Image (cartoon, grey):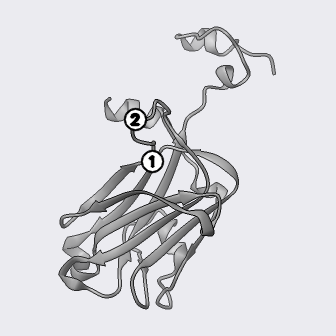
Amino acid sequence: MGSDDKQDSRAEIGKLAVWSVTSAKPGNGVEALRDDNLETYWQSDGGQPHLVNIQFQKKVRLKELEIYADFKQDESYTPNKIAIRAGNSFHDLKEIKVVDLEEPVGWVSFSLTPENSDKEYLRAYFVQLAVLSNHQNGRDTHLRQVKIYGPRQDLARAMGHPLEFSSLDFQMFSCVR
């Protein structure tokens, strides 16, 4: 699947969620994770694990989670081991995956689709990103951006339309408004 296919098959749904973190240094709070600025960052302030909580009002379809980390700029603040958990609430989270990062610079993408399943997405109300350790045994962490994606839904298919049109001219008239 090429990068264009990847972009077409997903939609960023982070704006539908309430975001929170376990701790933050003043001026480097949760808002820095979502400001689309790679120069700003969330900085934790306290013991590990450092948690980013993403809570949706309704159960949503989840496809991918992406983080932007920069070892060259952040060194010992850069995450080394991350766990991703999902569930209906904070109290019933199940670990989706644990990932080791080796000096990441740029966007790192994690699939949220269940392994050994034919589903293209995971359904959940709550997603948690846990920074379990940092490079060089660093205490606090820097994350520059976090994005969460769901599968892009074809409007005609969602409405139960039996036909799929491939040309833009036909797609324009595929449903009645």
Residues 66 and 81: in front is: 81
Between the C-alphas of marks 1 and 2, the distance is 14 Å
- Residue to which mark 1 is pinned: 112
10 Å neighbourhood of mark 1: few (<14), some, or many (≥20)?
many
Of residue 166 and residue 134, the one placed in the foreground of this image is 134
Q: Residue 48 at what x, y percent from top left?
A: 39, 84
Residue 45, horizontal then vertical, whole percent: 43, 90
Query: Is 99 positioned to the left or the right of 86 in the image?
Result: left
Residue that appears at 22% across and 71% down: 71
Front residue (pair 106, 153): 153
x 41%, y 79%: residue? 49
Query: Which disc is residue 98 wearing?
Result: none
Identify whether 144 is placed above or below 60: below
Side (left or right) of 123 relative to 118: right
Secondary structure under the numbered disc 2 in the rendered image: helix
Q: Place residue 15 in its image quadrant.
A: bottom right
- Please tell me which of labels 1 and 2 falls first in the chain: 2
Residue drawn 64% across and 58% down? Answer: 88
Amino acid type indicated by mark 1: Leu
Image quarter in which the C terminus is found: top right
Q: At numbered mark 1, what does the secondary structure look like: helix, strand or loop?
A: loop
- In the rendered image, which residue does mark 2 sit on? 6
Q: Residue furthest right?
A: 177
Residue drawn at the location 70% of the way across and 14% of the way down: 161
Residue 76 coordinates in the image, percent (x, y): 23, 82
Q: Amino acid at mark 2?
A: Lys
Q: Is residue 113 left or right of residue 150?
A: left
48 to 155, vertically: above or below: below
x then y, percent, for residue 29: 51, 81
Mark nearer the viewer, 1 or 2 = 1
The quadrant of the image that shows the N terminus is top left
